[in-house]
Image (cartoon, rainbow, N blue to C red):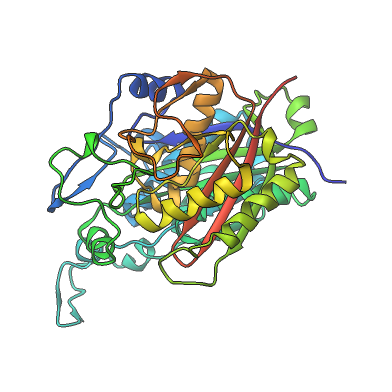
Amino acid sequence: MARRVVITSMGLVSSLGNTPEQILKNIEADKVTFESCPFDETVSVAPVHDFDLREYTGRFKNARYLNRGASFSVAAAMAAINNSGLGKSDLEKTGLFTGAGPNLDFGGEIPEIDEGEMNTERVQALFLLRFLPNTAASAICALAGIHGENSVIGTACSASLQALGEGFRRIRDGYLDLAFAGGGDSRISPGGIAAYKKAGALFTGSDDPASEYAPFDKDRRGFIPGEGGGFFLLEELNRAQERGAHILCEVKGFGTSMDGFNMTAPCPDGKWTEKAVRSALSQAALSPSAIDVVSSHGTGTPLNDAMEAEMLERIFGRNGPRVVGLKSWIGHLSAACGATELGISLAMMAGGFLPPIRNLSAPCNGNLDFVTKEKSFYFQTMLLENFGFGGQNSALVIEKWRE
């Protein structure tokens, strides 16, 4: 028999703040960090300001081996661990599932490259650690004393949501009682910005991105890169109740799939993203009509938003759940978007509040209930969606905890 899984702790690093109180306060004040990219004025970014890893880890000599995205992952994980109430013996048996993206800061890591020849005299002896996908996970385990089953997930923009799904499955099926899951990422570097600009995916050419970036709008024109991270403690329900843990929500279902269509573009008919969503709903034993809110992927790119809107209409029909787009507030966090959006969603769920999709004035689909004005709304169930390059699709269903 499948076991029930709940979330009992979280850690978050985001441009909206690091606590539910900060996040809701900044949303209510319409405060975002969208600004011109310091090394390409045609591009906009959404950075996390005043980030200091030492506030989360203390002195940590191996911090030098963490790229910026990995640093967000470690910070969020340590915040979740410190908030969890777990002791040493618990942590030794805990699993770890980490969503990770590539380090695209080529010039920052290896400053001298001439016609493909690298001058490595000035780089760190173990500079390769700043490129390996499991470095953040290794650092988290070393800092916290975690020794359980683990995995590093690299499924592009669905990575951290899939990490949560994998942790959920391990506990549901009895392999673990406890698991930390999430991820961190940053593509705000010259290499990262150049890569996505070359791919034609970025929102460009704006002097005021805060008032123009609009996922799902008919005039959408790409995404704004953000950065940050989120981590969560997933726990078997009876164990959580026995130790008196504060339960944030229950994880009800998870689904994942691959398009097998294109290396960068989603399959236009959304057939396989729909499969992931329906799998999550089926596993949760919930009908589409039971979902109150959808946290969309909503990047602002022409292809993604069109596919996602049509897919949501097929599943939910007209007058379906309310649809929010959190990337309109924090930008696109790549591998970290799912975990970070879950953290913000839990703040929304606890506060009974839905933020609007910023700047959405002409929706690309008139049959969906896009949230365009902030509203008080106490909701019970939420579907979270993330879709990544390579056709990677993930969907997670959560429900507000009720004793």
Between 323 and 172, the residue placed more toward the observer is 323
Residue ID at (50%, 25%): 348
**Residue 87: x %, y % from top left:** 64, 33
Residue ID at (24%, 58%): 193
Quadrant for the C terminus in the image = top right
Look at the picture and state if 322 lies above or below 95: above
* Count of marks, rendered view: 0
Look at the picture and state if 190 lies above or below 249: below
**Residue 61: x %, y % from top left:** 36, 49
Q: Is residue 133 left or right of residue 113?
A: right
Between 141 and 320, the residue placed more toward the observer is 320
Q: Is residue 121 left or right of residue 166?
A: left
Q: Is residue 341 left or right of residue 320?
A: left
Residue ID at (45%, 39%): 366
Q: Is residue 48 left or right of residue 11?
A: left
In this orientation, does residue 138 appear? no
**Residue 51: x %, y % from top left:** 29, 37
Between 283 and 134, the residue placed more toward the observer is 283
Query: In the figure, residue 275 lies in which quadrant?
Result: bottom right
